[in-house]
Amino acid sequence: MASIAKPVIVVGVDDNEASFYALEWTLDHFFVPSAPNPPFDLRIVHCKPVPSSSMGFGIPGVDIFSHVDTNLKNIAARVIERAREICISKSVNGATLETVEGDARNVLCDAVERHHATILAVGSHGHGSIKRAVLGSVSDSVSHHAHCTVMIVKKPKAKHEDGHH
């Protein structure tokens, strides 16, 4: 008898606390710690920006482009390592972590298609309206274009776990 494929959750992560919070929230709500057979297949996707060729400032002997790319690769490695540590701390095994170059809006929608995801989880960066108007919101974009349920995880403004106000 063929095994039935599990539904897939894709979580988009970047070097922002909001995305790590979204990953933690997803693990807390969709995965039972140390369960031998988790109900979902977890794919964690980091979108590594592509350094723009317009960054060639024309300084003789200085390759800004490769410096920026090296920096982006270092950030990507840190993001993936932090995501892996979060999974370990929540006793969630078997997550697939991947780094994909490109614009997060496209990369996450492509990941949904590629993995036939049931849910896409992203953090909400909480940009102000002006910054969001200029940059565009990844969560906004994927909620319109991803062919699955999109969960935008918002971090509570003030969390008082110790009871003090």
Image (cartoon, rainbow, N blue to C red):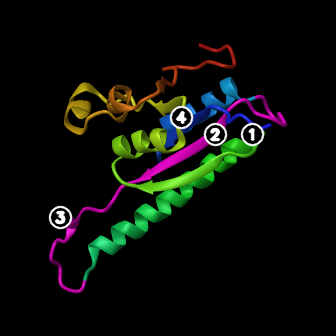
Boundaries of the magenta span: 32-61
Which amino acid does the dot numbered 3 rest on?
Answer: Ser
Residue identified by numbered label 2: 42
| Label 1 crowd (10 A; few <14 / some 14-19 / many >=20) | many
Q: Position of residue 81 (x, y in %)?
A: 62, 54
Please report contact status of discs 2 and 1: CB closer than 8 Å, yes or no: yes
Of labels 2 and 4, the one closer to you: 4
| Alpha carbon separation for disc pair 1 and 4 | 18 Å
Regarding mark 4 in the picture, which secondary structure is present there? Answer: loop
Residue at 57% over, 44% down: 44
Horizontally, is 142 left or right of 64 in the view?
A: right
- From what the image shows, is residue 143 above or below residue 48? above
Q: Position of residue 122 (x, y in %)?
A: 47, 33
| Alpha carbon separation for disc pair 3 and 1 | 41 Å
Residue identified by numbered label 3: 54
Please report contact status of discs 1 and 4: CB closer than 8 Å, yes or no: no
Please report contact status of discs 4 and 3: CB closer than 8 Å, yes or no: no
- From what the image shows, is residue 159 above or below residue 73? above
Residue identified by numbered label 1: 92
